[in-house]
Image (cartoon, rainbow, N blue to C red):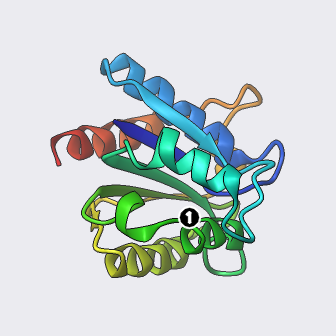
Amino acid sequence: MYTIISGTNRVGSHTEKVAREYREILETKNIKANLFSLKGLDVLHRNEAIKKVETEILIPTQKFIFIIPEYNGSYPGVLKALIDNSDINTVWNFKKALLTGVATGRAGNLRGMDHLSDTLHYMKMNVYYNKLPISVVNKVMNEYGHLNDETLLAVNRQLDGFIEF
């Protein structure tokens, strides 16, 4: 089972639009993926909502796709809080992860992907080597939330490799 995590809780974010593009591309490859948004989820402490998400989505998932925006040179605290307040052994250990960084700047959240990679490695996850930085996302995405052809080509290559991973 695949789950795409939109790594922010901001409403109307580029991150969620990119996550939807990933899900649509996976569907063209006959792969069903959950799209998990952090919007409206209380992640500041372990609670019933987190336990429900674990049981229904996170524990059954074997391959995670993290779409993470750049927040102050790293990844969002809301994603870190989800990780910190989940049951690491059952949710994350020995599963696979793909990382895509999203930024309106020119680095595509390279540092944030490195930080998240370190966290995921600590939790015994296998991180796919092809981490895709999507820079100037506000320019490579049109008003309908679709990525341009060049970026879609890179996403497709990344996903094809991850499917085989």
SS type, badge 1: loop
- Depth order, front residue of 101/164: 164
- Depth order, front residue of 53/3: 53
Instruction: Please give left or right for residue 6 compared with residue 129 in the image.
Output: right
Q: Position of residue 143 (x, y in %)?
A: 77, 30
Q: What's under tag 1, amino acid-wise?
A: Gly
Residue at x-position 35% and y-position 82%: 122
Residue at x-position 37% and y-position 42%: 60
Q: Position of residue 72 (x, y in %)?
A: 72, 80
Instruction: Please give left or right for residue 55 compared with residue 51 in the image.
Output: left
Residue at x-position 50% and y-position 33%: 34
Quadrant in which residue 61 is drawn? top left
Query: Is 119 located above or below residue 134 in the figure?
Result: below
Q: Residue furthest front?
A: 48
Query: Is 117 located above or below residue 38 in the figure?
Result: below
Give the residue pinned by disc 1.
108
- Depth order, front residue of 105/127: 127
Q: Quadrant of the N terminus?
A: top left
Q: Position of residue 108 (x, y in %)?
A: 56, 64
Residue 147 visible in this rendered orientation of the protein = no
